[in-house]
Image: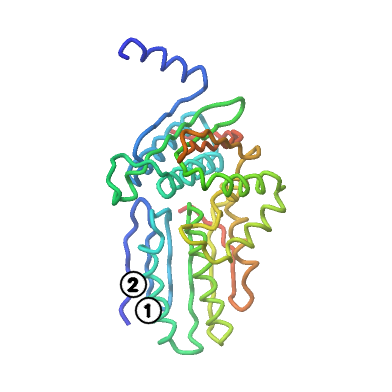
Amino acid sequence: MIDDLYDFRENMIREGIFFCFNGPVSQNILAEIGSALEQRMKLENMNRTTMLRVFSMMMEMAQNIMRYSVEESDSDDSAPLDTRMGSIIIGHEDNAYFVLCGNMVYNTEVEKLKDKLEKIRGMDRQQLRRYHKEQIRKRLEKGSQGAGLGFIGMAKKASRPIEFSFRKIDAEKSYFSLKTLIHKEKQEWKT
Amino acid sequence: MENLNIEATKYTPKIFFDAQNHVLDIRGMSYPENTSVFYDPVFSWLEEYLRQVERHQEIIVNIELSYFNSSSSKVVMDFLDLFEEVSSEGKNITVNWIYDEDIEEALEFGEEFGEELESVTFNLVRKIDI
């Protein structure tokens, strides 16, 4: 392993990745990632709109991990929310940032998630706005905290339709990945 | 009635509801892990206040949220619905949605909330840096 770290690093650089996290996701970690991200984008002369978009994509996706990941960092069933496992990756791709997050979900949830995401992928800005209006009024489904508002919000901010994939791991679980792109808009920051 | 004063944290906004001057302020970021843990007490205070306050008292609500996650946006909608409900019963409520013009979506968020209101006076106010 010790000899492979350099290759691992080179791979990430090749993929444009500048931030990578895998492990239990907590509010504290998110706040720290958020401020590190802000610092970095400021150095890259991004404007406040771009910074906030990337920040909020990361936050929505990471909070989804905290709420819905079915992989916990230990085997204790009563594990608190902040021990849910997930991956958070942020990088450059063409003239955009990408935020890529992943976590385990139960196979029984896969179809429902696919339907939700496909529906949103097929919508233009006006349709997303209308759908958002509808959903914000809806009573929450059991076990849901946001009526799918998170996905709609991401789709509204993203420069391209949200990409997603499910990889079946075993009879019980699949690995769910979600990727969004945010176009870069620059401004000069006075130091 | 006692004022409600909650200091801001990294994840939650500063809340200062002044029951004497009838000014209700919410300012900062909002992305708590669990919105009901943070906002339920705020709602309870608000419901009690709106029950007590005199019918024609002018009430000013200032909302300045630089970032809010999707579950917080649902909470904001619930707040506005509550204001809408009491203002249709005759209370005089003005909501100032304070937005940062450097953020493209900030005005749009305000507009979207504003479209849902009829009885409440809803102002979109551009933030001025001091």
**Residue in the image at 45% along x and 38% along y:** A103
Crowding near the residue tagged with mark 2, few <14, some 14–19, many ≥20 C-alpha atoms within 10 Å: some
Q: Disc 1 designates what residue? A: B19
Q: Along the horizontal axis of the image, is A134 left or right of A66?
A: right
Q: Nearer the viewer, residue B29 or A111?
A: A111
Q: CA distance from mark 2 to mark 1?
A: 8 Å
Q: Disc 2 designates what residue? A: B4
In the image, what residue type sits under mark 1?
Ala
Q: Quadrant of residue B42?
A: bottom left
Question: With respect to residue B75, does B70 lie above or below?
Answer: above
Q: Nearer the viewer, residue B113 or B55?
A: B113
Q: Of callouts 2 and 1, which one flags the residue occurring earlier in the amino acid sequence? A: 2
Question: Could you tell me which quadrant the N terminus of chain B lies in?
Answer: bottom left
Q: Where residue B24 sits in the image (x, y, percent)?
A: 43, 71
Classify mark 1: helix, strand or loop. Answer: loop
Question: With respect to residue B7, does A162 lie above or below?
Answer: above
Q: Kindly identify which chain the residue marked by label 1 belongs to.
A: B
Mark 2 in CB contact with mark 1 (< 8 angstroms): yes
Q: Nearer the viewer, residue B119 or B75?
A: B75
**Residue in the image at 32% along x and 61% along y:** B7
Q: Where residue B39 sits in the image (x, y, percent)?
A: 39, 65
